[in-house]
Amino acid sequence: MTRPLIGISCYSERADYWIMRDDDVVLVPRTYVDMVLAAGGVPVLLAPVNGAEEAVDALDGLLLTGGQDVDPARYGQVAGAHTDTPRTGRDAADVAALHRALGRGIPVLGVCRGLQLLNVALGGTLHQHLPDVVGAEVAGAHSAGPGVYAPVPVLTEPGTRAAEILGPGTVTVRCHHHQGVDRVAPGLRVSARAGDVVEALEWSDPAGPSGPSGPDAPWVVGVQSHPERDAEDLRLARALVAAATRARSRAFRPVRLAG
């Protein structure tokens, strides 16, 4: 069997490098590509443009990467002083790809911004700046400085995919985020926390024939951490690739969205 195709969402930014002179470029950190390769998948880069979601029909799994803050207008708020300038095109492309993946029932892994976008796209909201909510000292552990992915202990919830993949009880992950989940979207549940900060979400479908984490349940997982920043930690990537491999061999049921 050929390796599963894993779509990786990309950024669109201005660049001034080599032959590019203040050009718009599509890019993604190589660490995401290397993580998917090391886990046994084939990375497929998805440009953040209108219509790119059609490529999801050829994929076996979707990885929503980190990056800039999701536009607060998507969850009914005005941007605060610490919120990034909106990248509305990327937001739209990522949401479209997510809904396409959910409609097909292929597995989805959201990393940092990817978790936040998953929550917002399904009807949840975000804290725009964690220091305003949990205090600077607590929030500082999650965003220790530019380019710093600091170790943070998180507690996984029993019976969740997070506990199955990362381990039961307290586990250590690498974090770099100043925003976080506020109201959890319908259809999702918290699967890991660091104190009052939500560190992982996953699909919850109690009405499903096998329960929320049964073999036929949708594989939809989001983490605030950055597994791509630890080359030795392939737990989440391997779980995504394994779920994508299963998705090839049998029909996953599409995710039923609220409303």
Image: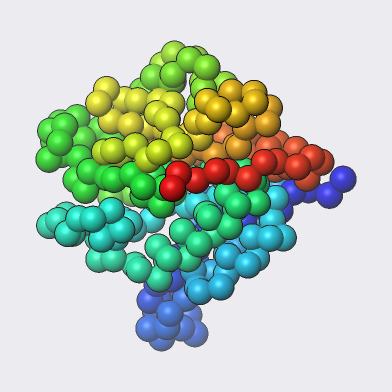
- The residue at 45%/37% (across/down) is 187
Question: Residue 13's x, y, as percent?
Answer: 40, 72
Question: Residue 39's x, y, as percent?
Answer: 67, 40
Does 178 sit above or below residue 212? below
- The residue at 42%/83% (across/down) is 23
Q: Quadrant of residue 17?
A: bottom left
The answer to whether one can see residue 116 in this image is no
Does 47 sit above or below residue 122? below
Residue 199 vs residue 23, the one in the foreground: 199
**How many numbered discs, if any?**
0
Q: Where, quadrant-wise, is the N terminus in this rendering?
A: top right
Residue closest to the far right = 1
User: In the image, 42: left or right of 126?
Assistant: right
- The residue at 37%/40% (across/down) is 185
Does 103 sit above or below residue 107? below
Q: What's the colour scheme?
A: rainbow
Question: Residue 166's x, y, as percent?
Answer: 52, 24
Residue 148 vs residue 191, the one in the foreground: 191
Does 32 sit above or below residue 50? above
Residue 169 vs residue 121, the one in the foreground: 121
User: In the image, 51: left or right of 37?
Assistant: left
- The residue at 43%/20% (across/down) is 156
Question: Residue 188's x, y, as percent?
Answer: 44, 35
Residue 196 vs residue 35, the one in the foreground: 196
The answer to whether one can see residue 18 in this image is yes
Q: Quadrant of residue 216?
A: top right
Q: Quadrant of residue 72?
A: bottom left
